[in-house]
Image: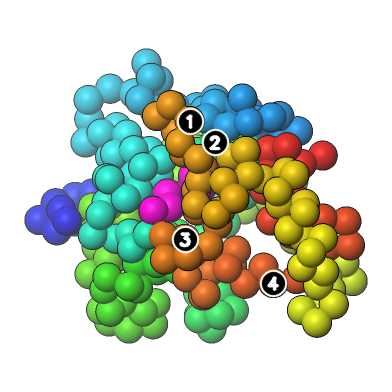
Amino acid sequence: MGAPRTFNASLIVLALLFSTAFQRDTGSTANSPPLVKGTETMTSAWDVPLNPLTDSSLGTSQLDELIRRGFRIFTNTKAEAPGLCGNALSCSNCHLNAGQREKALPLFGVAGVFPEYNKRAARSFTLEDRIIGCLLRSQNGSAIADVHENDSLSLTWLRSEEVLALSAYITWLSRGIPAGARLPWRGQNTISREALLPVTRLDLKKGEAMFKEHCTNCHGEDGQGVQIGDKKAGPLWGPESWNDGAGAGKAVGRTRERPRYRNRWSPTSP
């Protein structure tokens, strides 16, 4: 991890966050960013409307390089940040299209909502705190490091170049969107309590049939992902997937129409 350069990197991220292009405005609704439509098929699964690796407006400054580094970690976490990732998932396995897909946890403007109160931790979270929470659970970082959000040990990760790079990329996606503005594309993954069924009422046979019909082409019958060229869908369960503290790992309920996972994240969902 890049600890010696942490202080400078932190200042760079803060400079981007509070730049003139990122002013606070709690009364407006943000304009829609270039989201990949949620109805698109798997042919668009790796489309990235805003890609810092090809964006000619970025130069060679430390900040620009940090943004590119964050994108690479976001889309290939295990390879780019092995010390923070305990499974085979990348950030983009949940935040599809590098955090730029409609109804798939898009991250446009999200940097401007922090600090934000986190119910699980019972304290205010910075963007970096939230990133660490994802790394610990969705990417099972807790399997390789004894780090917890409310422990002083988490400072090791909080100060890491990898976390700062992810913060820089997410903040770059938020440029031009006023901090505090209402984000209509955020929160669309929430499922109402009325639409959920208790575990005791789940129809496992129906779920298996739906999985085989709709999911195996990409995830395989074992749920571990099918290699398609240089791409591979993420594992849905097992030691290479989320741990049981992750939000997706707690999706034990199902909607009345289709399994929760497919309903909210799959590119083939209506």
Which is more toward the observer, 243 or 36? Answer: 243
The colour mode here is: rainbow
User: Residue 2: which disc?
Assistant: none
Crowding around mark 4 (Cα neighbors within 10 Å: few <14, some 14 to 19, many 20+) is: some
- Res 231 quadrant in image: top left
User: Residue 241: which disc?
Assistant: 3
- Res 135 quadrant in image: bottom left
Residue to which mark 1 is pinned: 228
Q: Earlier in the sequence, mark 3 or mark 1?
A: 1
Q: Amino acid at mark 2?
A: Asn
**Residue 71, above or below 126:** above
**4 displayed left or right of 179:** left
Q: Earlier in the sequence, mark 1 or mark 4?
A: 1
Q: Earlier in the sequence, mark 4 or mark 3?
A: 3
Residue to which mark 4 is pinned: 252
Furthest toward the left, the residue is: 4
Q: Amino acid at mark 4?
A: Val
Pointers 1 and 2 in contact (C-beta within 8 Å)? no
Which is more toward the observer, 171 or 196? Answer: 196
Q: Earlier in the sequence, mark 2 or mark 3?
A: 2
- Closest to the camera, between mark 1 and mark 4, is 1
Q: Is residue 25 visible?
A: no
SS type, badge 4: loop
Give the alpha-carbon distance from disc 4 to disc 2, as whole Å: 25 Å
Residue for point 69% across, 72% down = 252
Q: What percent of the width, then of the height, locates residue 214?
A: 73, 43
Crowding around mark 2 (Cα neighbors within 10 Å: few <14, some 14 to 19, many 20+) is: many
- Asked if the magenta segment contains residue 124, the reply would be no
Q: What percent of the width, then of the height, locates residue 100?
A: 58, 37
The segment highlighted magenta reads 88-93
